[in-house]
Image (tube, rainbow, N blue to C red):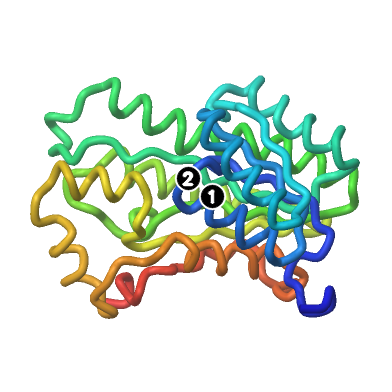
Amino acid sequence: MTTANLLLPGKVTFITGAGSGIGAAAARVFAREGATVVLAGRREDRLAAVTEELRESGAEASYIVADVARPEAARTAIAFTVEKYGRLDAAFNNAGIGGDRTPLHLMADDVYDAIMETNVRGVWNCLRHEIAAMLENGGGAIVNNSSVGGLVAIPAAAPYVASKHAVVGLTRAAADEYAREGIRVNAVAPGTTRSEITVDWFARNPGLEATAHSMTPQGRTAAPEEIAETVAWLLSDRSPFLTGAVVPVDGGFVNQ
């Protein structure tokens, strides 16, 4: 494949939640498409393993341990990226958690707090520093990971649904505010995907996987790489007039 055919040739990209699932898949897809990749997450062992895999394939890759729900950690991670590679071209704010499937009136406060801290504040923290870096560079592209739960309701998952709706709101607000600065901000809304969150949900809720498949017109679960491919296109120069969009990658779930 020539450089001209690559989606992200030479682009410095930053990925949160990059140690597993959709984040790790994104790191592999971005690297294959010519990007320099910086992985961020909380588990150093996983980050190191994915980074080594990418380097062995010939990609330029680095990692930084960071819990982006903490403002200082997000700032440090973006600063690390810019200091190491000179700029930030693209970012995928992917880190998120699911929480328990529990009726709203029985949901514990600490579950709500944890979900909102990671899923909303984590995106907020990253956006602030990513946008600042991209303003210095004359523009860039950002994709936030929402969910079909950011577009429709999911039973017994109120904090998760609220958090992913908030990600959609942050995406649209940032897209509107920075469009004239050359920064595009979009979101993906994955359907049921074989990530750690969904595997955990399925394990703790017998029958849930079959229910999810029955509610998806394609009748299956997505591979993380299928989400990552869409993110790569949104971050690339091949979607230059697309900003403020929320793209369902869900096998047709929200069309019903």
Would you call the spot at circle 2 few (<14 residues within 10 Å), some (14-19), or many (20 or more)?
some
Would you call the spot at circle 1 few (<14 residues within 10 Å), some (14-19), or many (20 or more)?
many
User: Which residue is rendered at x = 26% and y = 55% of the image?
Assistant: 153
Q: Position of residue 152 (x, y in %)?
A: 31, 59
Pointer 1 residue: 24
**Front position in the image: 134 or 232:** 232
Marks 1 and 2, how far apart in space?
A: 5 Å
Kindly indicate the quadrant of the structure image that contains residue 156: top left
User: Which residue is rendered at x = 49% and y = 64% of the image?
Assistant: 225
Q: Position of residue 69 (x, y in %)?
A: 53, 27
Q: Image height check: is 67 above or below 157?
A: above
Q: Is residue 56 left or right of residue 89?
A: left
Q: Position of residue 167 (x, y in %)?
A: 49, 47
Pointer 2 residue: 20
Q: Is residue 61 left or right of residue 247?
A: right
User: Which residue is rendered at x = 18% and y = 41% of the image?
Assistant: 101
Extreme front residue here?
56
- Is mark 1 in CB contact (under 8 Å) with mark 2? yes
Q: Secondary structure at mark 2?
A: loop
The kind of residue tagged 2 is: Ser
Kindly indicate the quadrant of the structure image that contains residue 87: top right
Q: Which quarter of the rendered picture does the C terminus lie within?
A: bottom left
The kind of residue tagged 1 is: Ala
Q: Position of residue 193 (x, y in %)?
A: 36, 59
**Front position in the image: 139 or 56:** 56
Tag on residue 142?
none
Q: Image height check: is 224 above or below 240?
A: above
Q: Secondary structure at mark 1?
A: helix
Q: Which quarter of the rendered picture does the N terminus lie within?
A: bottom right
How many labels, in total?
2
